[in-house]
Image (spheres, helix red, strand yellow):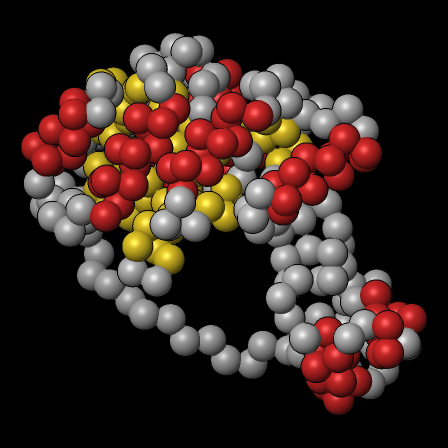
Amino acid sequence: TNGIITQVEFPLARVQPWVDAIFSFDNLGDAATFAIDVANAPAIITRAVAVFQAPIAASYLELPEVSNSSNVVTVQFSPAALASSLWRLAKNRGGNATTADQPTQPSETKPRALYLNSWNHTTLHALKKDKNVTYLQAAYASDNALHTVAQVQNFFPTSKLLQHLECVNMNGRVGFAVLSLIWPQDDNELLQILEWHEKHDIPIFNPHDETIEGGGMKGMSISHQLNFKRITDPAGILNPGKMRCYDEEVSSNCK
């Protein structure tokens, strides 16, 4: 919106194989707790840990050996990690390992890689089967992530919201990036869902608003962004309509 990227730097790590493992739980809270336990465990090297409230995994992702009642955690981990610790953590939380894909298995016999079921892939798979579904973008802070999982589950019926959680590092501890599937009847109900989250201190990065003011940058200084845009994009050719304040040219209303 406010500039052009001219250089990107990112760290590299050594190439290694990854094992895909799927765990099923009767209880969403147990699934979420297991996911955080795994992501926080220093002996288990993971690339991705995701949680899917029932019946997301069975209905939309078509994961093997998963039932409609299964709350599922998918884990991509290094075979060099202590796999026995992973299985023990699942058992301690009442979970079962339904499948684990070994990296030595021929590629033509492998199911779809788990990373192709996570993050925004989940929403896309759901949309293929249900055109009425959309999604949220939110975050559950690491210090109360599990409490928030229960809070959301207790308030919203599964006909309106199903939680999809991705483990992310938040200042050294694991919380959840949230891409829950939702079924609002109309824009008014969508707004009510968003407002409920924000009322309960769950930050929303609204994917249904194309502007930066209404999307995920609620904590920014609008006046600073407006001044920066005027310097870097004086003709207003970058992403027109993305910044309400710039289009209105009324900085006093945007502070």
- Report the front residue among 228 and 62: 228
The picture quadrant where one finds residue 69 is top left
Q: Residue 35: horizontal and vertical position, in percent? A: 30, 36
Which residue: 83% across, 65% down? 244
Which residue: 22% across, 56% down? 15
Q: Residue 6: horizontal and vertical position, in percent? A: 56, 81
Say whether residue 25 is visible.
Answer: yes
Residue 123 placement, left or right of 44: right
- Report the front residue among 147 and 214: 147
The picture quadrant where one finds residue 156 is top right
Residue 18 placement, left or right of 53: left
Q: In which quarter of the image is the N terminus?
A: bottom right
Q: Residue 31: horizontal and vertical position, in percent? A: 32, 28
The picture quadrant where one finds residue 216 is bottom right
Task: Report how many numbered discs are placed on residues in the image.
Answer: 0
Q: Residue 167: horizontal and vertical position, in percent? A: 37, 45
Say whether residue 237 is visible.
Answer: no
**Which residue reaches farthest bottom?**
231
Give the answer, above or below, for where 54 lies relative to 217: above
Q: Quadrant of the C terminus?
A: bottom right
Which residue: 26% across, 45% down? 39
Give the answer, above or below, for where 62 lies relative to 195: above
Which residue: 58% across, 30% down? 181
Give the answer, above or below, for where 195 lies relative to 214: above
